[in-house]
Image: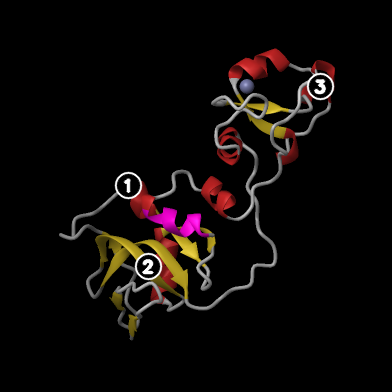
Amino acid sequence: MLMSRETATGARHAVAAPEGARHPVDAGPTGTPVTGEALRRALLLNASREPLCVVSVHRAVSLVLNGKAVVLESDGRLLRSERMSLPAPNVLCLTRYVHVPYRRTVPPTRRTVLQRDAYRCAYCAAPADTVDHVHPRSRGGLHEWTNVVAACSRCNHRKADRLLSEIGWQLLVTPGAPRGTSAVLAAAVRPHPSWSAYLLHA
Ligand SMILES: [Zn+2]
């Protein structure tokens, strides 16, 4: 079985995968084991090139070996087994479009909220490094996307547990659940640099 494809973007990763080949192990170009964040995760795109999710490299290799995905970006390192080698996938693309009936979202955490709001305070636009509950939790506010915003520590401290109506403040942004590109980015602990082109155009 030869899984070699010329993709629309010109990816040229020929993958020879003999029937029954065992999954390759992580190894560098010289066959030495490679460890680290970059090898553990890959960005999976739908056949439409829309980002779907982040998968483990183990899952990515399974998809490629089963002919369900092709590698679009690799850092050049090879995953080797006794009978085959495979470029370590950074970005891969499904060969068939899958319909996604709903888009999973990610929970609001300090990191994902700051990412959604681009690290800008929702009250004064200064650089933010804290998260504020617009309707304070101590007064019944929920921990949900529509009630959390990035805030600078100065605004967060000044606002304390008061309502915006009580201090005459207004939000500069309307908080909501991130979707699409930002959800994928937020789900990734640290997006690999090779993912950026695919995420920007999503
Ligand atoms: Zn502020």
Label 2 element class: strand
Q: Residue 166: x percent and y percent? A: 84, 17
Q: Which mark is residue 36?
A: 1
Tell me the residue at 37%/55% (across/down): 194
Viewer-side residue, 123 vs 151:
123
Tell me the residue at 76%/17% (across/down): 161
Q: Tell me which numbered mark, 2 or 3, is placed earlier along the sequence.
A: 2
Question: Does the numbered disc 1 mark a residue whose Cβ is under 8 Å from ligand 1?
Answer: no
* Quadrant of the image containing the N terminus: bottom left
Eyeballing the image, is 147 above or below 15? Answer: above
Magenta residues: mostly which secondary structure? helix
Q: Which mark is residue 72?
A: 2
Give, as a three-letter code, the residue at label 2. Answer: Leu
Give, as a three-letter code, the residue at label 1. Answer: Gly
Label 1 element class: loop
Magenta stretch encompasses residue 196? yes
Q: Which residue is under mark 3?
A: 163
Give, as a three-letter code, the residue at label 3. Answer: Leu
Position of 160 with respect to 92 (left or right) is right
Q: Residue furthest left?
A: 30
- Give the class, few, some or many, for how many residues have Cα within 10 Å of label 3's Cα (few <14, many ≥20): some
Magenta stretch encompasses residue 94? no
Tell me the residue at 32%/62% (across/down): 74
Measured Cα–Cα span from mark 2 to mark 3: 49 Å
- Give the class, few, some or many, for how many residues have Cα within 10 Å of label 1's Cα (few <14, many ≥20): few
Q: Tell me which numbered mark, 2 or 1, is placed earlier along the sequence.
A: 1
Viewer-side residue, 127 vs 71:
127
The residue segment tinted magenta is 194-201
Q: Residue 48: x percent and y percent? A: 53, 72
